[in-house]
Amino acid sequence: MQLRNALFSVCATLLLSFLLPAAAAQATSTTVRDGDTIQIGDTAYHLDGIDAPELDQLCINEQADPWTCGIDARDRLSRLIGGRSVHCDDLGPDKGRRGRHLGLCTADGDKVSLNQQAVRSGFAVSVEPAVKVHTKDDAAAARNATTGIWKGCFALPADFRIGKKDGALLGASCRPDRDREVRAVLFPDAPAAPPGCTIKGKLALRARVTGNIGVYHLRGCPSYPGITEPERWFCAEDDARAAGFRRAYNCRPGKGK
């Protein structure tokens, strides 16, 4: 009897040793990186089928004032999650964003994915092709209701990322008669850095040699002080790399943060 009890205890201990890591992985907290990207453990998921304003992107609100819509898009996604655990179906690497995976993500207790909810809230647009999530109907509903960024005027996030200043402007408050002034707000020469984001990015033709669209510069690197009018701001290096920027060659690992 004692031998059987001892064997049972050993087996139970071994079983728990296998189960506990799995439970910990499921309980891993979710970090919202921006309006369409979340981090679970070591994996960053870009929500499939959607595109939200970048953290450093500005929109114009219904009062014709500049609006930090990229920060609000991130905060809206955080509120949609509400501190709950999130499960993501991994749809494979995101070919458009280095180091990211595409995900169909749902918060515990929800029947509708975060992908669709973000678009329905009006803080993200629908994009195609999508691997699994199609959000055109959700986008149409948000546009018709003029919710989120649709109540103001904005450039598509994809156009903002590459500095395409002549792309289409969307939203209920766009003013064709003030087009030049509106675009000057949406694509400022010296955008303000979002809180906690110190990495400077510059679009650069020379970066295309390495398959990038720009170069990023870290604090403490020789090139950093000379970049007085960055076109992009990033909070982390992997955010910059995901956006298609490479590290400045004079900024070696360990030089800056």
Image (cartoon, rainbow, N blue to C red):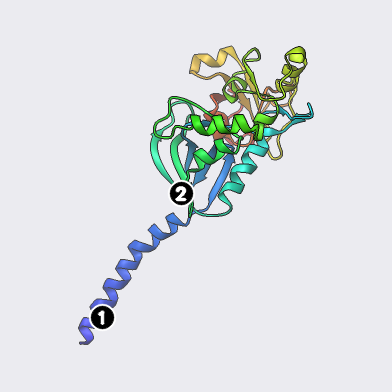
Frontmost of labels 2 and 1 is: 2
Q: Which mark is residue 111?
A: 2
How far across and down, in percent of the image, does residue 198 sit? 68, 34
Q: Residues within 10 Å of mark 1 (few under 14, many from 20)?
A: few
Quadrant of the rendering where the N terminus is positioned: bottom left
Three-letter code for the amino acid on which mark 1 is drawn? Ala
Query: Is residue 15 shown left or right of residue 87?
Result: left
Which label was assigned to residue 6?
Answer: 1
- The image quarter in which residue 155 lies: top right
Which of the pair 223/47 is nearer the observer?
A: 47
- Position of 24 with respect to 212 (left or right) is left
Count of marks, rendered view: 2
Nearest the camera: 154 or 23?
154
SS for tag 2?
A: loop
Q: Residue at x 39, y 31 (%)?
A: 131
Q: Which numbered marker is on residue 155?
A: none
In the depicted structure, whether residue 70 falls above or below residue 230: below
Q: Left or right of 176: which side holds 127?
A: left
Q: Nearer the viewer, residue 134 or 93?
A: 134
Q: Position of residue 68 (x, y in %)?
A: 71, 33
Residue at image coords 54%, 34%: 238
Res 76 → quadrant:
top right
What amino acid type is highlighted by mark number 2?
Answer: Lys
Q: Tell me the distance, in whole angstroms, between the alpha carbons under discs 2 and 1.
A: 45 Å
- Screen quadrant of the C terminus: top right
Asked if 195 appears above or below 159 in the picture, the reply is below
